[in-house]
Amino acid sequence: TLSPQADLSITKTDGQTAVSAGGSTVYTITASNAGPSNAPGSTVADTFPAACTSVSWTCVAAGGGACTAAGSGNISDAVNLPAGGSVSYTATCAISAAASGTLSNTATVSSAVTDPTPGNNAATDSSTLLPPGALGASPSALAFGTVNVGSTSPSQTVTLTNSGGSPLTVSSLSAATAPFALAGGSCGAVPIVLAAGASCTLDYSFSPSVAGPAAQSLTADAGIAGSTSIAL
């Protein structure tokens, strides 16, 4: 009597060699059965690393396969893998901002049916963890001195810099209001994207219409990469 045999296999990848702490990554996990026998009651399992602060996933089956449509946290899913069938998971991992080193994760597929080639029943994806972006402004305050009413000062420059290890996006920047004005610079309009180590400039001017002191505080916000204030 011939015993049933099913050549199960699994693959896993996020398509990235490096990911950012504080960001997220999306894994594609596919388990399949090359036959010749069906493998009902198989299990796809994935215990995500502690650096994944939260995980949500969905699953789509093909070739007569069956799996749980969606879930959260670790995967331990009872699936049906007929010969020629497959199940494919898309799992989104939110990465801790404090994570460092390597983000490594292994998914497995198993069955009570004999597998003639068990060496492909586990798959590991590893990505280098980059430190998050870090937004700063220099100088953090501008002093225009005494400017005559009805005149405009020479512009002064603030440099926004990403001193972190990952790109950042400045999603909001307070607008300067009279008697101050944004007079130019290289940053452009938000969203402002700065690669790791990159910088851009903001030029401000002062045009008083009445006598007396004037001040304004602006904020540039880059989410997990931080925010910074500019005093005018």
Image (cartoon, rainbow, N blue to C red):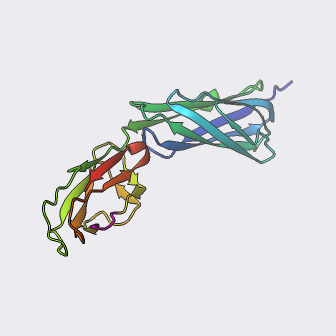
Magenta run includes residue 115: no
User: Which image quarter holds the N terminus?
Assistant: top right
Write the start and end of the magenta stretch as one range: 176-181
Residue occupying the far right of the picture: 1
Q: Position of residue 97 (x, y in %)?
A: 43, 35
Q: Is residue 129 left or right of residue 73?
A: left
User: Which image quarter holds the C terminus?
Assistant: bottom left
Q: Quadrant of residue 85?
A: top right
Residue at image location 21% in from the left, 62% down from the top:
212
Q: Position of residue 108 (x, y in %)?
A: 63, 30
Of 35 and 148, which appears nearest the observer? 148
Please identify the dominant SS of the magenta region.
Answer: loop
Tell me if I can see residue 147 in this picture.
yes
Tell me if I can see residue 88 in this picture.
no
Q: Quadrant of residue 134?
A: top left
Q: Position of residue 114 (x, y in %)?
A: 74, 25
Of 147 and 68, which appears nearest the observer? 147
Q: Quadrant of residue 6?
A: top right
Q: Is residue 94 left or right of residue 231?
A: right
